[in-house]
Amino acid sequence: MINQKTQLEKAERFRAQHLDEKLLILPNIWDALGAKLIQQIGFPSVATASVATALSNGYPDGEHIPFAELLEVVNRISSAVDLPLTVDIERGFADTIPQLKENIRLLIENGAIGINIEDSYPDHKGLNSIEDQCRKIEAVRETAIRCGVPMVINARTDIFFLKIDNDPMTQAIERARAFKKSGADCVYPILINKYDDISRFVEEVEMPVNVVLLKPISDLQYLEKIGVARVSVGPNLLNHVLTIMKTVAEGLKKYDSSAFFARDLLPREYLNQLV
């Protein structure tokens, strides 16, 4: 059973982490063991990534994982750690506002205190109108207030991802400002990848900004310096894990155990204490 008082405290703690001058780094995980590892290392919050959560449960990304299964994952993670948990819910797993409200209620009931919600179509070939997306954000905020948990809303805009506009910066700023007025706490211009653009965006929107960690913008100290509030890594932790597994397994298939012994592994005692 989720304790509402604890949920409230976690939501407030998570929101405060966006307003600190220190960069909030979120290594996105997909299960309870990963969440426990992140907590053990000392990160202040945990986040899921939709791609990682879907793939690790046998589904492609794009809201193909049944929402009931996603709720089970959320519950297992939130029950495993004492950290605030924010969940990537893609478009909200809903085609109507009433369904979105119900999904938000269920997410809170299962331990989530924050969400990512994106503004593109299911096929990622266009963007919701600003008005429609703002109605969704307002619905999330209204439901969170009714549930007594001030959920932290990270409003993702896919304008840079889709590359469908000649002036994505102006459009992204317009969307961010509208999302803020509708109740968003943070804005996520996914795939923005130039320091100058990020600096301008942060200055123009006057709200916490989340970026995804990309090689062209990989200097975390500099991102903190130019005012970025939050950095996430998307599905790339899962990708790192699978890349290493693939290398080791391919070696074994060729009767080559060098990759198997190429690194020091975590001691069994460490793994046991995680659970």
Image: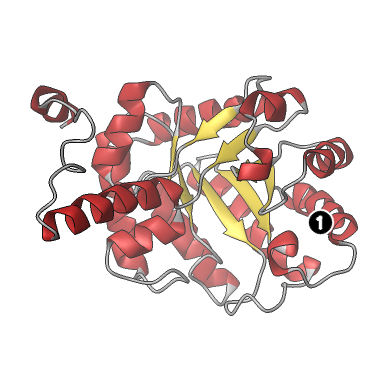
Q: Residue 17 at what x, y percent from top left? A: 58, 26
Q: Callout 1: 10 Å neighbours few (<14), some, many (20+)?
A: many
Residue at x 53%, y 66% (from the top left corner)? 100
Side of 34 where 140 appears, left or right: right
Quadrant where the N terminus is found in the figure = top left
SS of the residue under disc 1: helix
Numbered disc total: 1
Side of 214 where 28 appears, left or right: left
Q: Nearer the viewer, residue 99 or 94?
A: 94
Q: Nearer the viewer, residue 91 or 195?
A: 195
Q: Residue 185 at what x, y percent from top left? A: 67, 41
Q: Is residue 195 visible?
A: yes
Q: As displayed, is residue 119 above or below residue 13?
A: below
Amino acid type, mark 1: Ala
Q: Residue 67 at what x, y percent from top left? A: 37, 67
Q: Is residue 81 visible?
A: no
Name the residue that disc number 1 marks: 172
Identify the image quadrant of residue 70.
Answer: bottom left
Residue at x 34%, y 64% (from the top left corner)? 55
Q: Nearer the viewer, residue 170 or 67?
A: 170
Q: As displayed, is residue 62 above or below residue 194?
A: below
Quadrant where the C terminus is found in the figure = top left
Q: Residue 198 at what x, y percent from top left? A: 78, 41
Side of 203 where 249 appears, left or right: left
The colour scheme used here is secondary structure
Residue at x 50%, y 50% (from the top left corner)? 234
